């Protein structure tokens, strides 16, 4: 009979967070998870930094003027784990769905742009921190490392993800493909007037073609409350949300209008991707052997403890034992 690969229903959410309000954004996220699950979704994807929104001020004002908003973002960001992640996990568990959501992650005194992956039981499978904040975002977010870049093996397939501008890098997507990614989460923040949503579409569709993976593309909306909060004239909308077929780049569901909140759904059959493996599978038989990637998966820490070597016991009992067994010498002795 051979193998039969999984089939499941995916949901990609297009919505605006409750800007710079962690608790309200969590509640909105749980409501969107409920709506998607009630429509039969096994995998529910919410946008980049949905809790509690992106640092749009960094692109639009000097750092000194933007620091008060950065402080507000810090105070509304998410510790992992925390009460906020527990509530999202409870929603995932209640509806038996995988949930992937973008958050501003607070770790000690720094913030990171992070994707959180929840399994059907509501447990955190892991997270992906954006490798490099894009442009002015470096004023707000720290950098991720290789320890949070991986693919999760689930009962619906092998799942990985990238955040926004990471899709314009070559190697993050390539390395996910080499890890066996079948389902790709493409997470994007709502764009202001400085960027066109064609970037979202082109990068997300390219990933599906190049790496033979189904792409669940979820982008946030930049709504009127952001401009009012920051006292800036920002273009409303900036979203492109869709589900894309593996290997072809064909749009299976969506996109929604760029200013409209909603959820798009698609039935995904991983068996449909197999035909394309024989045409362009870039990390297997279509891999040109002249090119190899070396990936550092270590966690980079600012403080690394090195234990002192064990010293010889100078007690009388130890000395007597050494005299009785002269061959048993201390490795760190003189």
Image (cartoon, grey):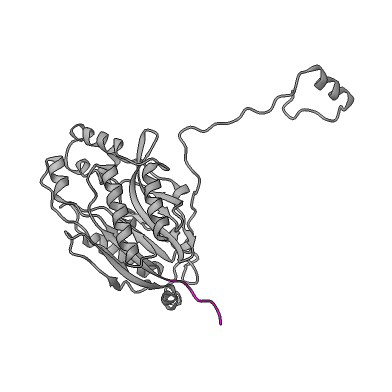
Quadrant housing residue 328: top right
* Magenta stretch contains residue 5: yes
Asked if one can make out residue 245 in the rendered structure from this viewpoint, the answer is no
As drawn, is 284 to the left or to the right of 46? right
Asked if one can make out residue 273 in the rendered structure from this viewpoint, the answer is yes
Quick one: quadrant of the N terminus? bottom right
* Magenta stretch contains residue 120: no
Can you give x and y, in whole percent of width and height, for residue 185 in the image? 36, 60
| Residue at the extreme bottom | 1
Quick one: quadrant of the C terminus? top right
Can you give x and y, in whole percent of width and height, for residue 253 in the image? 28, 70
Of 124 and 163, the residue lying toward us = 124
Quadrant housing residue 331: top right
**Residue at x 33% of width, y 64% of height:** 38
As drawn, is 266 to the left or to the right of 118? left
**Residue at x 37% of width, y 33% of height:** 109
As drawn, is 254 to the left or to the right of 112? left
| Residue at the extreme top | 316
Quadrant housing residue 141: top left
Residue 3's place in the image compared with 119, above or below, is below
Of 303 and 115, the residue lying toward us = 115
Residue 123's place in the image compared with 309, above or below, is below
Can you give x and y, in whole percent of width and height, for residue 231 in the image? 12, 40
**Residue at x 80% of width, y 28% of height:** 329
Q: Which residues are magenta?
A: 1-7
**Residue at x 19% of width, y 58% of height:** 196
The secondary structure making up most of the magenta span is loop
């Amino acid at each position: 009979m051979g193998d039969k690969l999984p089939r499941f229903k995916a949901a990609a959410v297009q919505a605006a967070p409750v800007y710079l309000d962690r608790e309200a954004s969590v509640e909105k996220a749980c409501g969107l998870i409920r709506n998607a699950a009630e429509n039969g979704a096994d995998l529910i994807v919410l946008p980049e930094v949905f809790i509690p929104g992106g640092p749009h001020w960094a692109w639009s004002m000097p750092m000194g003027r933007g620091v008060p908003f950065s402080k507000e973002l810090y105070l509304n960001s998410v510790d992992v784990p925390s009460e906020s992640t527990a509530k999202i996990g409870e929603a995932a568990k209640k509806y038996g769905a995988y949930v992937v959501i973008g958050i501003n992650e607070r770790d000690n005194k720094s913030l990171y742009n992070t994707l959180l992956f929840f399994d059907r039981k509501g447990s955190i499978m892991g997270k992906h921190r954006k490798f490099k904040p894009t442009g002015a975002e470096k004023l707000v977010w720290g950098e991720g490392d290789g320890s949070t870049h991986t693919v999760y093996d689930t009962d619906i397939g092998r799942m990985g993800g990238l955040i926004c501008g990471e899709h314009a890098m070559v190697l993050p997507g390539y390395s996910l493909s080499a890890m066996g990614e079948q389902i790709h989460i493409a997470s994007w923040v709502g764009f202001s007037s400085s960027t066109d949503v064609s970037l979202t579409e082109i990068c997300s569709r390219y990933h599906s073609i190049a790496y033979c993976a189904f792409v669940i593309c979820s982008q946030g909306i930049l709504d009127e409350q952001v401009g009012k909060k920051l006292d800036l004239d920002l273009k409303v909308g900036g979203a492109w949300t869709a589900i894309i077929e593996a290997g072809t780049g064909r749009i299976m569901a969506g996109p929604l209008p760029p200013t409209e909140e909603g959820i798009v759904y698609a039935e995904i059959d991983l068996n449909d991707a197999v035909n394309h493996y024989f045409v362009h599978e870039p990390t297997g038989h279509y891999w040109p052997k002249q090119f190899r990637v070396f990936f550092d998966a270590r966690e980079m820490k600012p403080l690394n403890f090195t234990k002192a070597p064990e010293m010889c016991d100078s007690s009388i009992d130890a000395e007597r034992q050494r005299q009785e067994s002269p061959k048993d010498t201390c490795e760190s002795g003189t």
